Amino acid sequence: MVKVIKKAVAKPAIKQPSEIKKIDSKKYLTQVPETLVFWCHDGQIFHDLDQLIAGFDAMSEEVFMYHANEDKNDFSCWILDVIGDGTLAQDIKKARNKADAKKITQQRYYDLTRLEG
């Protein structure tokens, strides 16, 4: 009879979900480089989610609809492609007006800042 001896192999450390969330939240809250800012149709420029939230207050409903309508959603695209937050990008697509978009973005911002801690 042959005995098989198993060698103990060190497994790579797996990040805990809370660690991943903290890393992601920091990334999602960081200002983007000047070359990747969101240029709003009314002249506003957004470097991060905090500025986007404030920008919703300053923009008209018409400007919001210019960026978010049945054909496109520039806010969602920027959030996904530049900020990298797929969750918020999907959620903001559901916004019917700028008040909804602001509320959705504010809630996500609040959740992210709580994770960053």
Image (cartoon, rainbow, N blue to C red):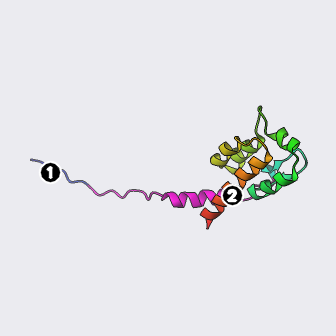
Say which of 91 and 49 sits in front: 91
What crowding class fits label 1: few (fewer than 14 Cα within 10 Å), some (14-19), or many (20 or more)? few
Side of 77 relative to 87 (left or right): right
Q: Residue at x 76, y 56 (%)?
A: 48
Residue at the bottom extreme, as displayed:
117
Say which of 82 and 67 sits in front: 67
Say which of 65 and 29 sits in front: 65
Is 22 contained in the magenta span? yes
> Which residue is label 2 attached to?
109
Q: Residue at x 53, y 61 (%)?
A: 19
Q: Quadrant of the C terminus?
A: bottom right
Residue type highlighted by circle 2: Tyr
Q: Looking at the picture, how far across and down is residue 110, in whole percent? A: 67, 60
Vertical placement of residue 22 versus 94, above or below: below
Q: Which label is found at residue 16?
A: none
For the record, the magenta segment spans: 7-34
Residue at the right extreme, as displayed:
43
Q: Looking at the picture, how far across and down is residue 18, in whole percent? A: 52, 60
Residue type highlighted by circle 1: Lys
Q: Residue at x 85, y 47 (%)?
A: 40
Is 82 contained in the magenta span? no
> Which residue is label 1 attached to?
3
Name which quarter of the figure residue 80 lies in: top right
Ranked by sequence position, the earlier of labels 2 and 1 is 1
Select label 2 or label 1 by which is in front: 2
Q: Looking at the picture, how far across and down is residue 4, in whole percent? A: 18, 50
The answer to whether residue 88 is seen in the rendering is yes
Q: Looking at the picture, how far across and down is residue 36, in whole percent? A: 78, 49
Mark 1 element type: loop
